[in-house]
Image (cartoon, rainbow, N blue to C red):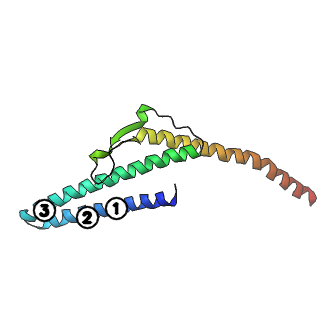
Amino acid sequence: MTWKERKKVRELRRRLWLLELRELNVNLTAAQYEPPPFDKAVMKLATLDKEKQAQLALLEEYESRYLIRKAQSWGIEVSYRQEWYTLKDRNDDPGTSGDRAVLLLNEAGKAAITKQIRNEQFAYWKHWAEILIPILSLIVAIIALSK
């Protein structure tokens, strides 16, 4: 993940956190007052919920892209199995621009790709260990014989 993408994901998570805090604040203030401000609080909660859903959708899209890109960088060919993806229409989300449908990884797809990445990383380090262990043992044996 590039630093720009990390910054974007961090910003999205920060916005979600702030929206949750504002939602909690609205809930607390609505509980303190009589019914007239409560209607205003309900309207504010509805707008906050829409913003929160939009931020969650963007974060989910970034996470899906990141996993696919990471898998491809490890040399894993990501198969486009139908059960791994969900089709998300960007027009449904408020605050998102673009009129396109996006394929997002669902939980099963994220788990499968994460497992493939983890297996590939393990194989990489296992390969290096198989190369380095005999070399290091030879160095130790030479040092032991020289004393």
Front-most of residues 24 and 103: 103
Pick whichever of labels 1 and 3 is earlier in the sequence: 1
Is any part of residue 105 visible from this angle?
Answer: no
Front-most of residues 21 and 61: 61
Task: Return the x and y of residue 24 as percentages of the image width and height.
Answer: 24, 63
Q: Name the residue under label 1.
A: 15
Up/down of 2 relative to 93, above or below: below
Whether label 3 touches label 2, CB < 8 Å: no
Q: Name the residue under label 3.
A: 40
Q: What element carries label 1?
A: helix
Q: In which quarter of the image is the C terminus?
A: bottom right
Q: Residues within 10 Å of mark 1 (few under 14, many from 20)?
A: some
Q: Mark 2 points at which residue?
A: 22
> What kind of residue is marked 1?
Arg
Front-most of residues 81 and 133: 81
Q: In this view, does 92 lie to the left or right of 72?
A: left
Instruction: Residue 91: name its quadrant.
Output: top left
Task: Return the x and y of residue 57 as percentages of the image width and height.
Answer: 34, 49
